[in-house]
Image (cartoon, grey):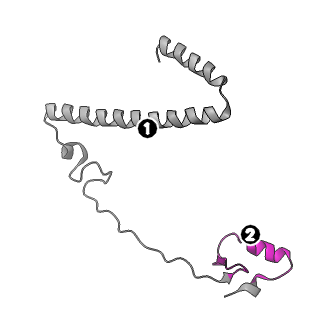
C-alpha cells in the first residue's frame, strides 16, 4: 500500500467512526459487493494473462495441468467412486415427532424427557 493509499484509508476509517450502526451495515454490504466484483475482475485478468503468456511460450493447458485440465486430479489416477451411505434407522421418536437414531449425543428432547424422570425407552420405535 502506498503512502497516499494509507492516508486515504485513515480518512475513510475516520469517516466510518462518525456513522451509525445501520449506515455501517450498508457500507459493509456495499464493500462486500465491490470486493466480489473486483475479485472476479482480477481473477479473469489473471486467467487471461496466464493464457496469453502460455500461448506465447507454446505451452498448452495439458502441459501445465495434465490431460484432465486444472481439475485438481493427479495424472494417471482414477477418481474413487463416491459411496452413498444410508442414514441410520430411527430408534426413538419424540413427543413432537422428533427422530433420533440412538447414535451420538442425545438430542435436547431426550435430555428433557430424562430430566422429567421418564425413560428414553418409552419413546422407542
Q: Is residue 28 toward the left or the right of residue 75 in the image?
A: right
Image quarter (top left, top right, bottom left or bottom right) of the C terminus: bottom right
Camera-side residue of 62 and 74:
62
Q: Is residue 59 toward the left or the right of residue 84 in the image?
A: left
Please report the residue visible at 51 percent of the width from the left and 33 percent of the height from the top. Answer: 31
Location of residue 34 in the rendering, given as x and y in whole percent from the top left corner: 45, 33
Camera-side residue of 38 and 20:
20
Q: Quadrant of residue 58?
A: top left
Please report the residue visible at 40 percent of the width from the left and 33 percent of the height from the top. Answer: 38
**Residue highlighted by disc 1:** 36
Q: Is residue 119 toward the left or the right of residue 59 in the image?
A: right
Mark 1 or mark 2, earlier in chain: 1
Q: Going by the picture, which residue comes out furthest to the top?
A: 3
**Residue highlighted by disc 2:** 108
Disc 2 packing (10 Å; few <14; some 14–19; many ≥20):
few
Location of residue 17 in the rendering, given as x and y in whole percent from the top left corner: 66, 23
* 72 is within the stretch colored magenta: no
How far is mark 1 from mark 2, CA to CA? 40 Å
Amino acid at each position: 500500500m502506498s503512502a497516499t493509499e494509507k492516508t486515504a484509508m485513515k480518512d475513510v476509517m475516520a469517516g466510518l467512526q462518525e456513522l451509525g450502526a445501520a449506515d455501517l451495515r450498508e457500507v459493509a454490504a456495499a464493500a462486500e459487493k465491490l470486493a466480489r466484483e473486483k475479485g472476479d475482475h482480477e481473477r479473469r485478468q489473471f486467467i487471461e494473462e496466464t493464457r496469453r503468456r502460455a500461448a506465447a511460450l507454446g505451452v498448452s493447458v495439458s502441459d501445465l495441468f495434465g490431460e484432465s485440465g486444472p481439475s485438481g486430479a493427479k495424472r494417471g489416477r482414477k477418481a474413487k467412486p463416491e459411496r452413498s451411505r444410508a442414514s441410520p434407522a430411527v430408534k426413538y421418536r419424540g413427543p413432537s415427532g422428533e427422530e433420533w437414531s440412538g447414535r451420538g449425543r442425545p438430542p435436547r428432547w431426550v435430555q428433557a424427557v430424562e430430566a422429567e424422570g421418564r425413560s428414553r425407552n418409552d419413546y422407542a420405535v
